Amino acid sequence: MFRSYLAAALRNLARSGLYSAISIFGLAVGLCAAILAGLVARNQLAFEHFVPGYENTYLGVSELMPSGRPPGYD
């Protein structure tokens, strides 16, 4: 069964080469973007683990609310 799937895939690649190349390139770019997004998210969630007692690290935020404008955060 796998052999017939492989034969059909190769025939389709040979018949429409440009369309197949665009599809494979798009799939590769999409997978790379997903892996990169996962690595960035993992880095942002674990960047302070080298600090002893990192479980007790907090983030201070100040909010500026000028009249007639959206609030700004520092």
Image: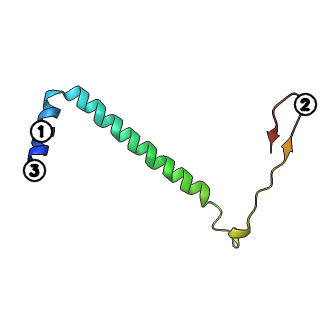
Which residue lies under the disc numbered 3?
1
The residue that appears at 9% across and 45% down in the rendered structure is: 4
Amino acid on which disc 3 is placed: Met
The residue that appears at 81% across and 32% down in the rendered structure is: 70
| Picture coordinates of residue 56, whole percent (x, y) | 73, 69
Amino acid on which disc 1 is placed: Ala
The residue that appears at 11% across and 34% down in the rendered structure is: 11
Q: How many discs mark residues in the rendered view?
A: 3
Disc with the residue nearer the chain's start (3 vs 1): 3
| Picture coordinates of residue 65, whole percent (x, y) | 87, 37
The image shows residue 64, relative to residue 17, as above or below, that is: below
Picture quadrant where residue 49 is located:
bottom right
**Which residue is at the front of the view, 2 or 62?**
2
The image shows residue 44, relative to residue 33, as above or below, that is: below
**Real-space CA distance between mark 3 and mark 2, rounded to the nearest whole angstrom:** 69 Å
The residue that appears at 64% across and 68% down in the rendered structure is: 50
Image quadrant occupied by the C terminus: top right
**Which residue is at the front of the view, 38 or 3?**
3
| Picture coordinates of residue 8, whole percent (x, y) | 12, 38
Which residue lies under the disc numbered 2?
67
Q: Residues within 10 Å of mark 2 (few under 14, many from 20)?
A: few
**Real-space CA distance between mark 3 and mark 1, rounded to the nearest whole angstrom:** 11 Å
Which residue lies under the disc numbered 1?
8
